[in-house]
Amino acid sequence: MLRYLPGLEHGVAGSTADDLIEAGVDQQTARKVKADMMRAAGAMITDRPDRDPHDTLKNLATSGGAEVGLKMLKDANALEPWGAAMDAAMKKLQTLGRS
């Protein structure tokens, strides 16, 4: 299961913007593209609270890009550290009384 914690998403968003920059997109455009993608996904999830967010995000993923990348990560067990990071972050938030 892929888990989500907003604070960790910032790192992923930064990485995605960096990937766009490495592909030749200028920095301002790369950051705007990533911000627009996050904003659109958030709006779609907010607009449909009755729908599972995973379904919404799956529908946003492009079969030739995001789905292929996610499959590669899953096949390499690369998402396991994400779960550990989520667990550690949630544990810390609980000790701070913010969960």
Image: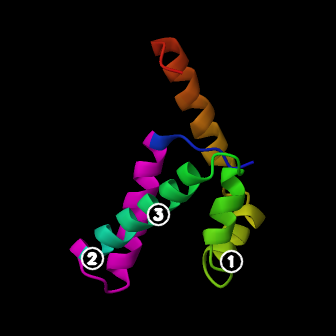
| Residue 26 among those drawn in magenta | yes
Q: Which residues are magenta?
A: 7-28
Q: Residue at x 48, y 19 (%)?
A: 98
From the viewer's side, name the closer residue of 39 and 79.
Answer: 39
Is 60 positioned to the left or the right of 1 in the image?
A: left
Q: Residue at x 42, y 52 (%)?
A: 11
Q: CA distance from mark 3 to mark 2?
A: 16 Å
According to the picture, the residue beneath numbered tag 1 turns out to be 68
Which amino acid, by three-letter code, is at mark 2?
Thr
**Numbered disc 2: secondary structure:** helix
Q: Is residue 38 above or below residue 17?
A: above
Residue 75: x and y in percent read 77, 66
Quadrant in the rendering for residue 35: bottom left
Query: Which badge, 1 or 2, is on the more N-terminal residue?
Result: 2
According to the picture, the residue beneath numbered tag 2 turns out to be 29
Query: Which badge, 1 or 3, is on the more N-terminal residue?
Result: 3
Q: Is residue 97 above or below residue 85?
A: above
Q: CA distance from mark 1 to mark 2?
A: 24 Å
**Numbered disc 3: secondary structure:** helix
User: Local crowd at mark 3 within 10 Å, few (<14), some, or many (≥20)?
Assistant: few
| Residue 44 among those drawn in magenta | no
From the viewer's side, name the closer residue of 88 and 64.
Answer: 64
Residue 31: x and y in percent read 30, 67
Image quarter of the C terminus: top right
